Image (tube, grey):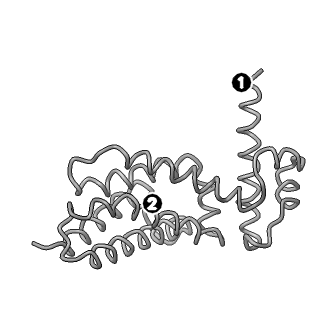
């Protein structure tokens, strides 16, 4: 019985997430109501409230689930700083591949700014304590470079989801890794 309830909960959350992603293609996040989501998902309000408090809670859970996987990958120690872009980007790619259509809709919606903000926060939270390992001339240069890389990375993925980049996701991951290595190499002291 517990397995059926677990599968039902997963199914309900997927229906809610998919409905919200569809609605984000039609109107801004702040205009979407619980009624819109339950109607689109074809569930009752009780099912929605069994899983989420409100629409921002759905977005928050989606973002947390996305970035907890990245944070888990980053919690494993990298022997050298040069491996960080590869670890980060490979994990991000695996997470995106789990539901490409959902992420495509979110990245091309008003919720993109929330995803971008969380990506920047995740990168900065992880990399800030490791500043000394990178050999930057100053803390300000390091923080500026980290923000630039995180913001640029999220924009690259948004452009890819919008069909504006002629790469497969695998190729984009490799290209992004090369760009991050190049930026890091060119901004650190010799």
Quarter of the image for the N terminus: give it: top right
- The residue that mark 1 highlights is 3
Q: Which mark is residue 122?
A: 2
Q: Quadrant of the C terminus?
A: bottom left
**Mark 1 or mark 2: which is in front?**
2
Q: Residue at x 57, y 53 (%)?
A: 64
Could you tell me which residue is drawn at 61 percent across and 69 percent down? 108
Q: Position of residue 58 (x, y in %)?
A: 71, 56
Residue farthest along the top direction in this orientation: 1
- Indicate whether 168 appears above or below 190: above
- The 10 Å Cα crowd at callout 1, few under 14, some 14 to 19, many 20 or more, is few
Viewer-proximal residue, 36 or 130?
A: 130
Q: What kind of element bears circle 1?
A: helix
Q: CA distance from mark 1 to mark 2?
A: 33 Å
Contact between labelled residues 2 and 1, with CB atoms less than 8 Å apart:
no
- Does dot 2 land on a helix, a strand or a loop? helix
Mark 2: few/some/many CA within 10 Å (<14, 14-19, 20+): some
Give left or right: position of 139 versus 26. Answer: left
- In the rendered structure, which disc, 1 or 2, sits on the residue that comes first in sequence? 1
Q: Reply above or below: 48 against 149.
A: above
Residue in the image at 21% along x and 47% along y: 79
Percent across and percent down for residue 103 are 59, 58
Most distant residue in the left direction:
190
User: Horizontal and vertical percent for residue 56?
Assistant: 71, 62
Image check: 164 left or right of 175?
right
The label on residue 94 is none
Percent from the top left, x then y, of residue 107?
59, 66
Q: Quadrant of residue 149?
A: bottom left
**For the point 50% across and 72% down, which residue is it?**
164
Task: Residue 33: name its quadrant.
Answer: bottom right
Q: Residue 63 falls in which quadrant of the image?
A: bottom right
């Amino acid at each position: 019985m517990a397995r059926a309830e677990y599968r039902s909960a997963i199914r309900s959350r997927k229906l809610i997430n998919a409905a919200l992603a569809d609605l984000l293609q039609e109107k801004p996040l702040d205009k979407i109501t619980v009624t819109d989501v339950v109607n689109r998902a074809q569930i009752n309000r009780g099912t929605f409230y069994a899983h989420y408090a409100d629409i921002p809670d759905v977005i928050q859970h989606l973002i947390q689930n996305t970035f907890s996987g990245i944070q888990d990958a980053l919690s494993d120690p990298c022997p050298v700083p040069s491996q960080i872009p590869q670890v980060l980007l490979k994990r991000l790619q695996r997470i995106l591949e789990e539901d490409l259509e959902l992420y495509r809709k979110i990245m091309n919606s008003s919720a993109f700014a929330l995803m971008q903000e969380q990506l920047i926060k995740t990168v900065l939270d992880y990399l800030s304590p490791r500043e000394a390992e990178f050999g930057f001339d100053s803390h300000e240069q390091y923080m500026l470079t980290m923000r630039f890389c995180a913001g640029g990375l999220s924009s690259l993925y948004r452009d890819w989801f919008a069909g504006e980049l002629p790469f497969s996701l695998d190729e984009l991951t490799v290209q992004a890794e090369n760009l991050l290595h190049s930026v890091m190499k060119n901004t650190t002291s010799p």
